[in-house]
Image (tube, rainbow, N blue to C red):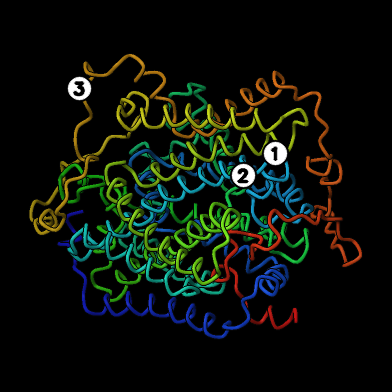
């Protein structure tokens, strides 16, 4: 690495590019918000939303994964643990098939626009509220990590105070939500995808040139043990093996794509079931492209830093700062490109976080306040804005907690696994088991949630020993001492991730077994415990005596080959849907299907 010289720094051109990308994103959002004024009644919105085609929805689905967590976290994970992360490509394929052929048909047939609406259809209102509360917990935790990740990058490349960057990011997103409609609409998602891919590709091309070709990168990775694609060890305590990624990863991502409102609200808005399925399958191509870019970037990281690891040599404070460090090192002679990379990390984050904050406020108002009060629309509007500000502050606080959770990608996936697993079990209980009743649903969900939280929080307090996580060796023999002299002073906050793990003698026995379970298995744990406990309680409380309308279950009517045989249903070929509303006079049927997510004025005009 010594021949690359000293690292660069953020230049005025970088700030210009960074600001321009964010300004364009905001301008597109403002444009659609202004054009859409007066056309935002719930009925017009829902009609317009139901007219979407597969391509823009697939872009939006893909964009949701292109946050700073992916851009910073995945290459760093590959750098430390090897290219086994690429096995997630298999998981993604299974997830898309499961969601397209099982969850989507049922939700589409029931005319579901809020996933938690299904819980009230199948069980009762209390189960819906419980599911909503757990969704709120999940999104607050995840949003904190999404705020923390780009703040870490900005701190690294510009020396901007880390706490200041986190607060600024959170406040910008909260401001977006308070204005209402500023969150980039679906075409902004498309713009952001291209910016993010441009950031990735610029790093990959320059990295290949600097290292003298892709062959050199592959050789370095092979010699360093990074090409560890296949490991069939069945041990559930191992962090990443073929089985933990394929089985655990499938459960984890199904919890996101199958039942998480932020994803379901996108593909369920398509004009036909065929288009909805097509959007999921097209999105799979995008996921594979993102994964390929991230894994290749991780291998380039290792090839460049194989003789001088910036993390262990104290040039950076956390592994997730490796990508920004690499950008300033190999792209220092290209003004504006480092700015493009930071904009790449930020543009997805602003969209994701503002959407999350807005969704949290909307869910709280529509599911937890509106059905039980007689407040005027004006008062509810003020409450919603207040909740947006409150959730924004709460997410900033969670960003501070996220700084102590280690790798951002593992922290984000752990949260989705711990919280999404029990929810996946709850929905599966309702969809596949006619004997399941509301008592069993509540009991199963609470026990499953408790078990997955116990394992997940324990793993944070007592991280698995290297024997199970198996980080690959890093070297500092070739370090140039002068190169990073100005970097350690930039990072003003020492992360817990840089500290040594607790003394082995202080670990309880349970830490080496229960708490060492692979984070990818938290989802399976939550799902299975929720299912098993829910079924047992249901059977003990008269579940077999109840009669459940078959329309509320996954059945033969949801099995179709319309995608595989390229059958495009016409308007007379639509499945019958249930006409159902929980509270007819409450405005929007879908609590988080807000106009700033999928508001396409041209579609509204088309539907009129």
Which residue is the site of mark 2? 128
**Earlier along the polypeptide chain: callout 1 or callout 3?**
1
Q: Relative to the observer, which residue lies in front, 221 or 366?
A: 366
Label 1 belongs to which residue?
Answer: 123
Q: Is residue 400 left or right of residue 227?
A: left
Q: Residue at x 64, y 32 (%)?
A: 441
Asked if the residue under mark 2 is in contact with the one under mark 1, i.e. CB atoms within 8 Å, the reply is yes
Q: Position of residue 258 (x, y in %)?
A: 63, 47
Alpha carbon separation for disc pair 2 and 3: 44 Å
Q: Is residue 217 visible from the viewing direction of this image? A: no
Ranked by sequence position, the earlier of labels 2 and 3 is: 2
Report x, y in % for residue 451: 48, 26
Q: CA distance from mark 1 to mark 2?
A: 8 Å
Q: Residue furthest front?
A: 374
Q: Is residue 42 above or below residue 267?
A: below
Residue at the image position 86 percent from the left and 62 percent from the top: 569
User: Which secondary structure lies at badge 1?
Assistant: loop
Quadrant of the frame with the C terminus: bottom right
**Residue 208: which numbered mark, if any?**
none
Horizontal arrangement in the rendering, residue 409 relative to residue 130 (left or right):
left
What label does residue 503 carry, if any?
3
Q: Does 345 appear above or below 413?
A: below
């Amino acid at each position: 690495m010594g021949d690359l010289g000293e690292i660069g720094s953020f230049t005025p051109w970088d700030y210009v590019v960074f600001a321009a990308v964010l300004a364009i994103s905001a301008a597109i959002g403002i444009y659609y918000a202004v054009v859409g004024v007066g056309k935002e009644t719930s009925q017009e919105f829902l009609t317009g939303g139901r007219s979407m085609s597969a391509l823009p929805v697939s872009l939006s689905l893909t964009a949701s994964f292109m946050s700073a967590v992916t851009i910073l976290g995945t290459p760093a994970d590959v750098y430390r643990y090897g290219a086994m992360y690429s096995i997630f490509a298999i998981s993604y394929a299974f997830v898309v098939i499961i969601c397209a052929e099982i969850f989507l048909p049922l939700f589409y047939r029931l005319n579901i626009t809020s996933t938690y609406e299904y819980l009230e259809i199948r069980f009762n209102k209390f189960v819906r509220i419980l599911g909503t509360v757990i969704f709120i917990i999940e999104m607050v935790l995840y949003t904190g990590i999404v705020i923390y990740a780009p703040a870490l990058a900005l701190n690294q490349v510009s020396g901007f105070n880390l706490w200041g960057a986190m607060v600024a990011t959170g406040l910008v997103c909260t401001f977006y939500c308070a204005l209402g409609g500023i969150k980039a609409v679906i075409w902004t998602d498309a713009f952001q995808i291209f910016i993010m891919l441009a950031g990735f590709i610029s790093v990959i091309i320059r990295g290949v040139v600097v290292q003298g070709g892709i062959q050199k990168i592959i050789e370095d990775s092979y010699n360093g043990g990074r090409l560890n694609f296949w490991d069939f060890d069945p041990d559930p305590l191992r962090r990443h093996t073929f089985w933990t990624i394929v089985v655990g990863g499938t459960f984890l991502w199904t919890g996101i794509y199958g039942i998480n409102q932020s994803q379901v609200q996108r593909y369920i808005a398509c004009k036909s079931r065929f288009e909805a399925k097509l959007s999921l399958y097209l999105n799979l191509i995008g996921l594979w492209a993102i994964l390929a870019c991230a894994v290749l970037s991780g291998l380039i990281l290792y090839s460049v830093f194989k003789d001088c690891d910036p993390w262990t040599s104290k040039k950076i404070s956390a592994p997730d700062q490796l990508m920004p460090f690499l950008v300033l090192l190999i792209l220092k002679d290209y003004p504006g490109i480092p700015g493009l990379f930071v904009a790449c990390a930020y543009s997805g984050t602003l969209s994701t976080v503002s959407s999350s904050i807005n969704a949290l406020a909307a869910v709280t108002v529509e599911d937890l306040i509106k059905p039980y009060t007689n407040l005027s629309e004006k008062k509810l509007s003020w409450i919603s804005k207040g909740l947006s500000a409150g959730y924004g502050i709460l997410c900033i606080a969670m960003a501070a907690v996220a700084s102590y959770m280690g790798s951002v990608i593992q922290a984000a996936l752990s949260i989705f696994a711990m919280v999404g697993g029990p929810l996946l079990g709850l929905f599966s209980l309702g969809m596949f088991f006619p004997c399941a009743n509301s008592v069993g649903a509540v009991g199963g969900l609470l026990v499953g949630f408790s078990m997955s939280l116990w394992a997940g929080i324990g793993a944070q307090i007592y991280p698995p020993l290297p024997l199970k996580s198996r980080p690959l060796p890093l070297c500092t023999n070739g370090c140039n001492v002068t190169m990073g002299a100005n970097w350690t002073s930039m990072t003003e906050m020492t992360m817990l991730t840089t500290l040594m793990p607790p003394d082995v003698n202080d670990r309880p026995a349970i830490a080496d077994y229960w708490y060492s379970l692979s984070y990818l298995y938290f989802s399976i744990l939550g799902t299975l415990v929720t299912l098993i406990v829910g079924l047992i309680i249901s059977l003990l409380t008269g579940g077999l005596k109840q009669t459940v309308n078959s329309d509320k279950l996954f059945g033969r009517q949801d099995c179709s080959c319309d995608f595989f045989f390229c059958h495009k249903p016409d308007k007379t070929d639509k499945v019958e849907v249930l006409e159902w509303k929980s509270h007819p006079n409450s405005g929007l049927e879908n609590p988080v299907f807000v106009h700033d997510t999928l508001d396409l004025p041209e579609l509204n005009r088309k539907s009129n």
